Image (cartoon, grey):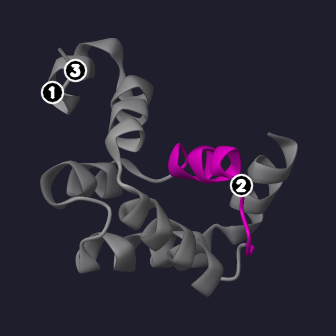
């Protein structure tokens, strides 16, 4: 039986992020990638780089992804705003990762 986001909360925020990323569809991951590209972070990110970037998003975005999914317009807009504001940090982490 798989873990829900709620069942992993006791394991910490990173466990919740891993659970959400692990069950994200290819379409949701593509939307996440596209938001990062549109914000000027980078194009052609690998799966591992995308996951590193996902682990950096603020808790409010994680909460939205839990409720609506990564492909939701509001969540994508929040990812874009975060990536635009913190592109230097994201670039540093994905290239160090």
Query: Circle 1 is placed at which residue position?
Result: 6
Q: Which mark is residue 2?
A: 3
Q: Is residue 8 left or right of residue 83?
A: left
Mark 3 Cα-neighbour bin, 10 Å: few <14, some 14–19, many ≥20: few
Mark 1 Cα-neighbour bin, 10 Å: few <14, some 14–19, many ≥20: few
Image quadrant for the C terminus? top right
15 vs 90: above or below: above
Which type of secondary structure does the marked residue at label 3 adopt?
loop
What segment carries the magenta color?
42-56
Q: Name the residue rendered at 22%, 20% in the picture.
A: 2
Q: Is residue 14 left or right of residue 46?
A: left
Q: Can you tell which of label 2 and label 1 is closer to the viewer?
A: 2
Q: Earlier in the sequence, mark 2 or mark 1?
A: 1
42 vs 4: above or below: below
Which type of secondary structure does the marked residue at label 1 adopt?
helix
Q: Position of residue 88 (x, y in %)?
A: 76, 66
Q: Name the residue rendered at 54%, 77% in the picture.
A: 34
Q: Earlier in the sequence, mark 3 or mark 2?
A: 3
Q: Is residue 60 left or right of residue 44?
A: left
**49 magenta-colored:** yes
């Amino acid at each position: 039986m798989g873990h829900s986001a709620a069942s992993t909360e006791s394991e910490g925020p990173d466990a919740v992020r891993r659970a959400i990323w692990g069950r994200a569809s290819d379409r949701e991951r593509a939307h996440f990638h596209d938001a990062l590209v549109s914000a000027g972070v980078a194009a052609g990110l690998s799966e591992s780089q995308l996951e590193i970037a996902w682990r950096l998003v603020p808790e409010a975005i994680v909460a939205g992804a839990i409720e609506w999914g990564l492909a939701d317009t509001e969540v994508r807009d929040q990812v874009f705003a975060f990536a635009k504001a913190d592109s230097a940090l994201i670039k540093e982490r994905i290239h160090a990762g």
